């Protein structure tokens, strides 16, 4: 099956392309510039600015499914204007859905966001994007999965670990959720489906609600030496852990997150025991797995 990924050169796009290829899909990457990664240079690439309908029509031609990741958000560096965010995220999404309608494509995965809402132009763009998906579904009967990704912006390794307890999600979970969604929409397992893409730490409710008090002991019970690591690396702990019920995603598309705070602590412990300096590591990156 052939899958188009818009925004393929981005942080999430590259991870999704790799995961789709590993899952056996034929991938066409679309973006305003090709990715720099060596392992993706031989994959089909088409230049596509989603604000340009002609670019989009060429990109979707011959595809079985489309993963629409192309978007600007407020955390980009250097920052972009609200006008650009709106044009890419709203006009671009309309052009992708319209091109899919013209091409008869019935399987779509849309990248929404945890920032969905009315607090920023970016958040509003995702409200409109989801409404456009709903409209396209009602007009055509297409199978569409809308994924409200939590944050996976590249960050320093230790900050990444801390953010997993708040609004962060491991890029591998993002990629796996997206591939599971592609399979689900191709197999028509869902009509119009939406889920949050976050992590699940498997914590009891009392630990979630008072992590500063109960969290270190809970971590220690699962990863011996965790308390020492938390103190040594001065990992900032939240009062409460952000946690969502993701059971519907497992039921509907067969996905559940795999990389939570305990996995981060296990990785940190392995690096610490080998004397690896983690202060300059960034996530996501091509750092070797422990």
Image (cartoon, rainbow, N blue to C red):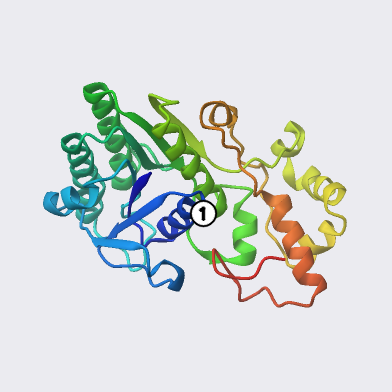
Label 1 neighbourhood size at 10 Å, few (<14), some (14-19), many (20+)? few
Which image quarter is the N terminus in? top left
Image coords of residue 55 (percent x, y): 16, 54
Residue at 73% across, 44% down: 211
Q: Is residue 117 above or below residue 19?
A: above
Q: Is residue 106 above or below residue 75?
A: above
Residue at 43% across, 71% down: 37
- The quarter holding residue 184 reads top left
Work out whether residue 127 or residue 12 is closer to the camera in this orientation and state it: 12
Image coords of residue 115 (percent x, y): 41, 43
Residue sticking out furthest to the left: 54
Which image quarter is the C terminus in? bottom right
According to the picture, the residue beneath numbered tag 1 turns out to be 22
- Residue 101 lies left or right of residue 42; in this view the side is left
- Residue 275 lies left or right of residue 157; in this view the side is right
Q: How many marks?
A: 1
Assign a secondary structure to mark 1: helix
Work out whether residue 222 or residue 76 is closer to the camera in this orientation and state it: 222
- The quarter holding residue 125 reads top left
Image coords of residue 40 (percent x, y): 41, 66
Residue at 77% across, 60% down: 230
Image coords of residue 239 (percent x, y): 68, 45
- Residue 220 lies left or right of residue 80; in this view the side is right
- The quarter holding residue 225 reads bottom right
């Amino acid at each position: 099956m052939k899958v188009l990924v818009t925004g393929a050169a981005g942080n999430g796009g590259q991870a999704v392309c790799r995961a789709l290829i590993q899952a056996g899909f034929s991938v066409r990457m679309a973006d305003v510039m090709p990715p720099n990664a060596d392992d993706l240079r031989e994959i089909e690439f088409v230049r596509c600015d989603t604000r340009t309908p002609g670019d989009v029509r060429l990109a979707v031609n011959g595809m079985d499914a489309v993963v629409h990741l192309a978007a600007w958000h407020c955390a980009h560096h250097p920052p972009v204007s609200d006008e650009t965010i709106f044009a890419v995220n709203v006009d671009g999404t309309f052009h992708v859905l319209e091109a899919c309608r013209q091409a008869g494509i019935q399987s779509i995965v849309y990248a929404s966001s945890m920032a969905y809402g009315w607090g920023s132009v970016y958040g509003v763009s995702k409200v409109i994007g989801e409404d456009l998906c709903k409209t396209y579904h009602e007009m055509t009967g297409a199978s569409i999965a809308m994924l409200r990704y939590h944050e996976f912006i590249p960050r320093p390794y230790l900050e990444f670990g801390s953010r997993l307890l708040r609004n962060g999600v491991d890029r591998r979970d993002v990629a796996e959720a997206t591939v599971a969604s592609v399979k689900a929409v191709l197999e028509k397992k869902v009509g119009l489906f939406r889920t949050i893409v976050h992590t699940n730490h498997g914590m009891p409710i009392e630990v979630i609600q008072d992590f500063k008090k109960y969290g270190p002991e809970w971590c220690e019970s699962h990863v011996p030496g965790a308390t020492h690591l938390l103190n040594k690396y001065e990992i900032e702990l939240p009062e409460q852990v952000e946690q969502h019920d993701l059971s519907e995603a497992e039921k509907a598309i067969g996905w559940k997150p795999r990389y939570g705070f305990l996995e981060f602590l296990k990785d940190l412990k392995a690096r610490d025991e080998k004397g690896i300096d983690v202060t300059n590591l960034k996530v996501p990156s091509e750092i070797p797995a422990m």
